[in-house]
Image (tube, rainbow, N blue to C red):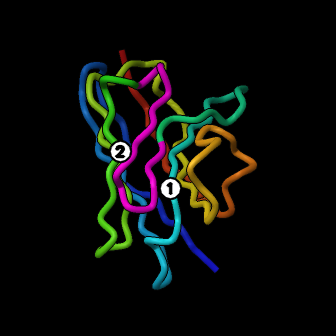
Amino acid sequence: QVQLVESGGGLVQAGGSLRLACAASGRTFSSYAMGWFRQAPGKEREFVAAISRSGGSTYYADSVKGRSTISRDNAKNTVYLQMNSLKPEDTAVYYCAARYSGNYGWDVRGLYDYWGQGTQVTVSS
């Protein structure tokens, strides 16, 4: 029903910035709350940030709070993750996710209905 395609990943030096984007298919993008998760080698997929359907509420993992900003442009069916002051520990595959249900459990993987293929972010020392 919904296809998600991430972009914007790449190699960046510590202290640098990246802006990830997730483009969604369909005409009902605004019906979905959106989230970003990441998975490093040997680790479980972990929550990074989420945004409500209207964009009025945002949520962040402690590890990225103050350094990252999630936003959405419903007219473009796109959600963004601006990441600043990147650290080597930010290195991971970043996944975009969508959920029809919302307003709770922003960090719970099982509550998201659709996932993108992921985009690699590598932060060098």
Q: Position of residue 85 (x, y in %)?
A: 27, 22
Q: Residue at x 50, y 35 (%)?
A: 48
Q: Position of residue 116 (x, y in %)?
A: 58, 60
Q: Residue 47's quadrant in the figure?
A: top right
Q: Earlier in the sequence, mark 2 or mark 1?
A: 1
Numbered mark located on residue 115 in the image: none
- Residue type at tag 1: Met
Numbered mark located on residue 34 in the image: 1
- Residue type at tag 2: Ile
Q: Is residue 119 above or below residue 92?
A: below
Q: Residue at x 45, y 54 (%)?
A: 52
Residue situated in front as seen by the camera: 123 or 105: 105
Residue situated in front as seen by the camera: 100 or 61: 100
User: Per the image, is 62 magenta?
Assistant: yes
Q: Residue at x 45, y 61 (%)?
A: 53
Report the side of 65 relative to 43 (left or right). left
Q: Residue at x 46, y 73 (%)?
A: 29
Q: Which residue is mark 2?
A: 70
Q: Residue 97's quadrant in the figure?
A: bottom right
User: Chief secondary structure of the magenta span?
Assistant: loop
Using the numbered discs, state the Cα–Cα distance from disc 2 to disc 1 in whole angstroms: 9 Å
